[in-house]
Image (tube, rainbow, N blue to C red):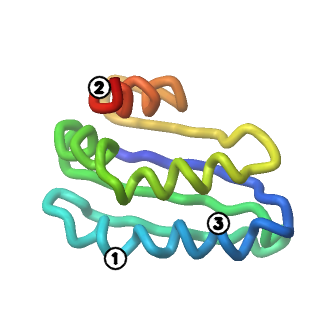
Amino acid sequence: MTCSIDMHFPRADLDEAMRLLHSVVGVTEARQGCRACTVIQDAVDDSRVLYSEVWDSRNRFHEHVRTDEFRRVLLAMDMCCEQPQVFVENLAGRRGLAHLRTLRGARET
């Protein structure tokens, strides 16, 4: 299971967004089932960032989406100057932002 989020930040919010995203990496990678968690800035446009997670199972990913750590990713997404592009991939295909909202809503309602 892979979740990739392509984000574009206003220059004024870039440092804070990067701080939020980097604060999630180590904690996420330490979770059982996480294979990788990365934050990559575009080489040409450093205000464009790709955040990515790879999980060994859909259930572990779903559990992670409901954590406070993932909430920081959502906070960073709220700082974007354009709609983030979200791809959640597994053998069944791709899902996006609506899928993340559904997963988060299971706990927040």
Judge depth for marks 1 and 2 and give the one in front: 2
Q: Which residue is mark 3?
A: 17
The answer to whether the residue labelled 2 contacts the one labelled 3, judged by CB atoms less than 8 Å apart, is no
| Marks 3/1: CA–CA distance | 16 Å
Q: Amino acid at mark 2?
A: Ala
Q: Which residue is mark 2?
A: 106
Q: Amino acid at mark 1?
A: Gly
**Upstream in the sequence, badge 2 or badge 3?**
3
Q: Is residue 93 left or right of residue 66?
A: right
- In the picture, the disc for residue 13 is none
Q: Quadrant of the C terminus?
A: top left
Mark 2 neighbour class, 10 Å CA radius: few under 14, some 14 to 19, many 20 or more: few
Q: How many marks?
A: 3
Find residue 85 and report its image quarter. top right
| Marks 2/3: CA–CA distance | 26 Å
| Marks 1/2: CA–CA distance | 25 Å
- In the picture, the disc for residue 26 is 1
Does residue 90 lie above or below 71 as drawn?
above
Q: Is residue 10 left or right of residue 63?
A: right
Q: Residue at x 52, y 30 (%)?
A: 96
